[in-house]
Amino acid sequence: MRVAPKEIQSFRDDFTYTNSAAAIERFPFPFPEDEYRYSVNIEAHQPKGGEGSAFEHYIDIDEHYLSEMAERELVLKDMPNRCLVMEHMDLACWEMLERYMVSLAEDYPEHFTLTRDGDSWRWENKLLHIDDHFTFGDSATLPRPPLDYIGRQVQGDFALMDQREGNLFMDAGMVTCPADWSLAFDAGMSFDEWHGPVPMVHNEGIIDRARKYLMALPVGQPVRRLNWTLTVNARMDTSSETYNEWGHERASITPENVGEKIYLRVEVQVLDRMPRSNAVTISIRTYLLSLEDLVTNKAWAVRMHRTMKTLPEALIHYKGLTRFHGMVVDYLAQFDPAN
Ligand code: HEM
């Protein structure tokens, strides 16, 4: 199965979200070793894993496409400031739109078509029944400004960084499914400032090295890294803004429901240099998999147990796992023969 977007499922209220067997198989499991530590885990964003893999294309469109786009609409309707663009980022947003439209049309011709005649463009998105003609670079000819327009048609969150004064600044973005952070809070901050709360990385020089690496990122050589956390329920929007809606759910975990209610949340982050503006874009694509589904893969179950068991206290706390981490380890122990 390459792409067969399912009917719309929910990431809130009744949480009807499910993963098919094919989606479980292609889940980007993030742990290469039995112990997890923070690192500058960057690799070239090249195809890996063959046809149908989450790393087959520049942008991964999967069975959750319609559900994630519907969820994004709900968030933006409530909180339009989940999409923020500073004026000097307009060119970068157009470049991102171009990069995304070109790669979607190339990689998924059955769903997306881009026709270009100079600056006169036609964009067709058959999944969302969109067919628009516009002039590239002229926001007045699109139904919405470029980032707002393309962001509503691509799974994942997006931030665009301006490079100046020896740093990267988060000066634009669309962030509707973050793992406990806020675009409105971080907007305008530098790479070092928004990473301020992360434990352990500063002494180890990880943030310094990552920033230097990204500032030297060449055009046309995108890279990716994986990050992860655990989320209660299949909730996409765990933003700081809505903490009052989801924070208390951390106390709802019991030994009986932990396998069903705790989800491994993996972010595939793709970083890319835009050629004209010199901005760096990041797409943060979130995948959710319940522990119950995860342990259907025996190797993952064992690895997950060992990484969770040896997770440093500072990470357990920072990632917000304190209330249920012990229950996760106990649940996973039954799948580890070495236990
Ligand atoms: C958090 C590393 C790039 C935005 C983190 C964390 C690490 C990290 C280790 C803690 C995550 C956790 O435990 O869940 C890196 C490295 C990067 C990188 C090595 C190099 C490529 C970026 C970029 C952005 C970003 C380009 C731009 C959006 C964030 C945010 C947080 C975070 C918003 C949450 C911070 C908070 O607690 O408020 N990063 N990061 N990171 N990262 Fe990065």
Image (cartoon, rainbow, N blue to C red):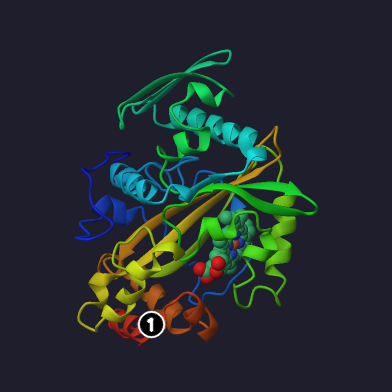
Q: Residue furthest right?
A: 165
Task: Indicate left or right for 291 with 118 as reference.
Answer: left
Asked if disc 1 is less than 8 Å from ligand 1, the answer is: no
Residue 10 drawn at (x, y percent): 24, 53
Q: Is residue 80 above or below residue 241?
A: above
Q: Which residue is mark 1?
A: 325
Q: Is residue 52 above or below residue 338?
A: above
The front one of 261 and 134 is: 134
Residue 241 drawn at (x, y percent): 43, 62
The front one of 305 and 222 is: 222
Regarding ligand 1, which quadrant of the image does it lie in? bottom right
Query: Mark 1, residues whose alpha carbon is within 10 Å: few (<14), some, or many (≥20)?
Result: some
- Residue at the spot x=50%, y=63% of the render? 181
- Residue at the spot x=69%, y=64% of the render? 192
Residue 157 visible in the snapshot: no
Residue 151 drawn at (x, y percent): 45, 40
Q: Residue furthest top?
A: 117
* Viewport quadrant of the C terminus: bottom left
Q: How many numbered circles does the render carry? A: 1
Task: Indicate left or right for 305 with 47 as reference.
Answer: left
Residue 168 visible in the snapshot: yes
Residue 190 drawn at (x, y percent): 69, 58
Q: Is residue 149 above or below residue 182?
A: above
The type of residue carrying mark 1 is His
What kind of element bears circle 1?
Answer: helix
* Viewport quadrant of the N terminus: top left
- Residue at the spot x=52%, y=74% of the render? 36
Q: Is residue 165 above or below residue 30?
A: above
The front one of 155 and 182 is: 182
